Image (cartoon, helix red, strand yellow):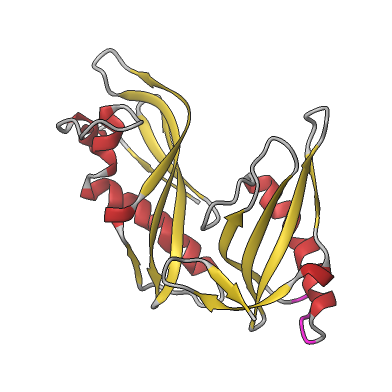
Amino acid sequence: MSYLIGAALLALFALSPAPQTKEPPSIASARQDPRFHALVEKQFRAYEASLATHCKDIHPDWNRATDRLYGTVELDKDGYPYRATWAEQAPGTACGEPRRFRAMILVREGKLETERMLPGDSDTSAQLEADVRDPLLTAAVGFARDIKPSCAVDVLDTHLLSAPPHPWQEVWLVNICGHRLNVPITFIPDATGGGTSYSISSDKITVAAGLTASGSSSTR
């Protein structure tokens, strides 16, 4: 699901420059604008709505929001972003439970769009995430007898343990039919750049005790 806004809302890029940051001043200003926050929160709510809890009560902490810029930023003749891509992350709560909300922000030909991302800091693409879900569920079925193939996989948080482009590791905090689990996943990029394989083992899964205030998970 994505949300689009027209040129009128992109006037927010013309706000006064923010203090010097790693991104262009126009992007830094946009990230502080309440209209931008409202737009991105729609994506956060859409993700929560896709989970079994269907939580509508979300509270991102925009004062602690961070971003990750991908590639370079192209500006138009007036100095506004014409093409840019970044991931926006905001810690907060969903129905009282800590979250690290995240969404992809894309500016294309001056129009801003948001796209769904897993919460946390996973480095998977949407396609890779989709590919991993069935093997993850299969591993979870092997971990707990009462988890069935019909169970939904709700990803509540992700932690990047080592970064690409070499094989990298992540731990996903998931809820599957009432089981809250930490699932380690190893991603292995193909040497030819043709794709990425992955490894998930039932014997490496652990029971998660819950989330801490910072959004990290603990096990018992």
Q: Quadrant of the C terminus?
A: bottom right
> x%, y% of residue 18?
20, 34
Q: Image point 83% across, 30% down: which residue?
A: 191
**Residue 8, can we see it?**
no
**Residue 173, can we see it?**
yes
Does 205 appear in magenta? no
Q: Image point 44% across, 58% down: which residue?
A: 101
Looking at the image, residue 179 sits to the left or right of residue 79; the answer is: right
Q: Which residues are magenta?
A: 146-150
Establish if 177 lies above or below 47: below
Check the image and name the residue furthest to the left: 16
Residue 130 position by quadrant: bottom right
- Viewer-nearest residue: 42 or 91: 91
Q: Image point 76% across, 64% down: which residue?
A: 136
Looking at the image, residue 158 sits to the left or right of residue 189; the answer is: left
Report the magenta stretch's main SS: loop
> x%, y% of residue 189?
77, 38
- Viewer-nearest residue: 49 or 163: 163
Check the image and name the residue furthest to the bottom: 146
Looking at the image, residue 209 sits to the left or right of residue 128; the answer is: left
Check the image and name the residue furthest to the top: 77
Q: How many marks?
A: 0
Does 148 appear in magenta? yes
Q: Image point 43% across, 70% down: which residue?
A: 98
Looking at the image, residue 147 sits to the left or right of residue 182; the answer is: right
> x%, y% of residue 30?
26, 38
> x%, y% of residue 96?
39, 78
Establish if 196 lies above or below 194: below
